[in-house]
């Protein structure tokens, strides 16, 4: 990924190029029997959002009114490194709300509604901390690997459809 981003010939907003890159990585990992992993690649640019995913990590665009699962069409069983990845592509005109990218260690152990409420009510940097804490076990460990990333044009909480009630509640937690 780092090499693609640094390559001036690689078109960052070309969803096919990202899919091809995931297939190349898949073949290389499979040839080395390096194991399997998931991937979500998202490029935010002037043409909007383009991305690809493989495995069971996800990307959502969360607005005050809805959750748009960008990765809903991915095949969660065909991970990178298995030699048979089928990257699922997604495109949107622009980022609306907050982009949330996370591993299944979040999505398997927390409800969609709770995740969305946290993202809507807190600045994105604080939301990451809360989302990770949400799936932490009492022992301090995690039931699965957890990776969380967010992006937003505005670092403030999202206004709720009913005004700013969610943001006010989140600020007092």
Image (cartoon, rainbow, N blue to C red):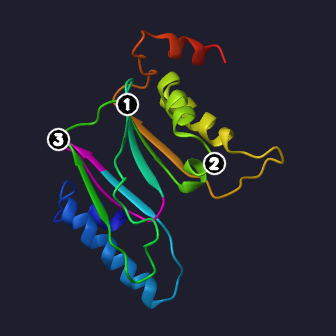
* Residue 35 image position (x, y, % from top left): 54, 80
Image vertical order of residue 2 relative to residue 90, above or below: below
Question: Which label sits in the foreground, 3 or 2?
Answer: 2
**Left or right of residue 63: residue 103:** right
* Residue 14 image position (x, y, % from top left): 18, 59
Q: Which mark is residue 66?
A: 1
**Left or right of residue 105: residue 141:** right
Query: Which mark is first along the chain, 1 or 2?
Result: 1
Q: Name the residue under label 3.
A: 46
Q: Name the residue under label 2.
A: 109
Label 3, secondary structure: give it: loop
* Residue 67 image position (x, y, % from top left): 39, 36
Other residues around mark 1 within 10 Å, as few (<14) / some (14–19) / many (≥20) = few
- Whether the magenta-drawn stretch holds residue 62 is answered as no
Question: Which label sits in the foreground, 1 or 3?
Answer: 1
Q: From which residue to which does the magenta span run?
A: 43-56
Q: Kindly identify the residue that appears in the image at 53 percent across and 47 percent down.
A: 148
**Left or right of residue 68: residue 45:** left
Query: Which mark is first along the chain, 2 or 3?
Result: 3
């Amino acid at each position: 990924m780092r090499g693609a981003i640094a390559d001036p010939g690689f078109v960052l907003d070309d969803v096919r190029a990202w899919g091809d890159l995931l297939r190349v990585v898949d073949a290389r990992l499979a040839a080395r029997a390096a194991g399997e992993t998931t991937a979500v690649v998202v490029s935010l640019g002037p043409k909007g959002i383009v991305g690809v995913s493989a495995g069971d990590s996800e990307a959502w665009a969360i607005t005050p009114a809805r959750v748009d699962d960008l990765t809903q069409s991915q095949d969660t069983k065909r991970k990178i490194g298995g030699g048979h990845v089928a990257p699922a592509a997604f495109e949107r005109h622009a980022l609306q709300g907050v982009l949330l990218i996370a591993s299944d260690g979040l999505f398997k152990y927390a409800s969609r509604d709770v995740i969305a409420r946290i993202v809507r009510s807190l600045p994105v940097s604080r939301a990451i901390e809360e989302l990770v804490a949400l799936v932490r076990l009492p022992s301090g460990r995690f039931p699965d690997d957890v990776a969380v990333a967010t992006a937003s044009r505005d670092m403030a909480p999202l206004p709720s459809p009913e005004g700013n009630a969610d943001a006010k509640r989140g600020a007092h937690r």
